Amino acid sequence: MIPIIKKSLLNGIYKEIKKYDEIVIARHVGPDPDAICSQIALREAIKLTFPEKKVYAVGASVAKFKKFGNLNHINYNELNNPLLIVLDVPNLYRVDGIEGLKYKNILKIDHHPKEDIVGDVDWTDTEKSSTAQMIAELVLYSKLKFNQKIAENLFLGIVSDSERFSLKNTTYETFETVKELIKQSNIDFTSLYDSLYTRPFSEHKFIAFITNNLVINEHKLGYIKISDQDLKDFNVDVATPANLINGYNFIDELLVWVFITEDIKNDQYKISIRSRGPVINEIAHNYNGGGHKFASGARLKTMEEVDNLIKDLSKACQDYENK
Ligand code: AMP
């Protein structure tokens, strides 16, 4: 078995974890299966390896992700200079649930382009399919232990963020890592797909609604504005459109597509963008957002900003077609 990541990096991460009695593991707001599964898998791997350590996975709970494991709700005043591990998020303002936490060092593990978080120990690699792939490499190739449940969560995080190994971020290393995970843990991986892909019929009707109402312009930009009432009509939550957007990846008439969802609770529009060609994260950056080259997001306050974003994305499509 050939370690995929540098031995020195692995050792550095393992040593940093080993040093601390208390560890807090955080990830981004509005978590997806990659963020949650990575966080819970890493917490369990550290606890399995070092049973005496206190390890907490923090951030708001999401009801439909409880099946991956529970999060911890703790009083930060009781902690004494813990290590903060930040997973799957490059910007400090998007880290969920660390208000009031006084930490000693940051260990960052992430596959997004670098932003303002710089870990005292930092493993940022945009070539990885998912943060779960990175945690899987860590448990496979370092002294951290893992078990079947940990392997299941890591498998699910990888499958989810690579959209079943179909996105451009999937590499031979992704398969190598998954192969080792399955081989060493003997997980029944085909039965795990249920927990990612089984959904109520109302959600399928919502997919039909998106399909029927997606506006596609002459430059192959698709967009839909989803109101709070639409979410209520289909009994889905504000996070659902982002979970469905990858499903539009193989449509001839689309180069870039964007879902704009009214988020009444936070008085903003939640934007999800995907691309099959033009780089979109630089555009998202101009609109209080960011993300990967071909999968980005943003949060906007006004419909005027939304319309400007649509114009910029349309221009990017036009430029891409004229290249
Ligand atoms: P989503 O469409 O919500 O799945 O997000 C796609 C990608 O964009 C993810 O990698 C997110 O981390 C990133 N992203 C989403 N929203 C924002 C934001 N407001 N700021 C920076 N990055 C974001």
Image (cartoon, helix red, strand yellow):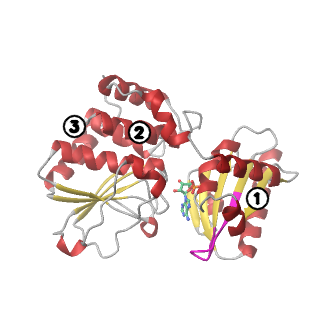
Residue that badge 3 annotates = 145
Q: Could one spot residue 123 in this view of the protein?
A: no
Q: Relative to 232, is 319 above or below?
A: above
Q: Residue furthest left?
A: 52
Image quadrant in which you'd find residue 96 = bottom left
Name which residue type carries label 1: Ile
Q: Of helix, strand and loop, which one carries label 3? A: loop
**Mark 1 or 2 closer to N-term?**
2
Question: Dot 2 lies on which element?
Answer: helix
User: What crowding class fits label 1: few (fewer than 14 Cα within 10 Å), some (14-19), or many (20 or more)?
Assistant: some
Q: Which mark is residue 179?
A: none
Quarter of the rendering occupied by the N terminus: top left
User: Please, is residue 311 above or below residue 181 in the view?
Assistant: below
Q: Answer with left or right where residue 72 lies relative to residue 159.
A: left
Q: Which of these two is toward me, 50 or 284?
A: 50
Q: Magenta stretch? A: 259-269
From the top left corner, tell me how far across and down residue 297 is, in percent.
Answer: 60, 59
Which residue bears the numbered disc 2? 133
Residue 185 picture location, percent across and down: 31, 27
**From mark 2 to mark 3, how far is it between C-alphas?**
16 Å
Residue 250 pos. (x, y %): 72, 37
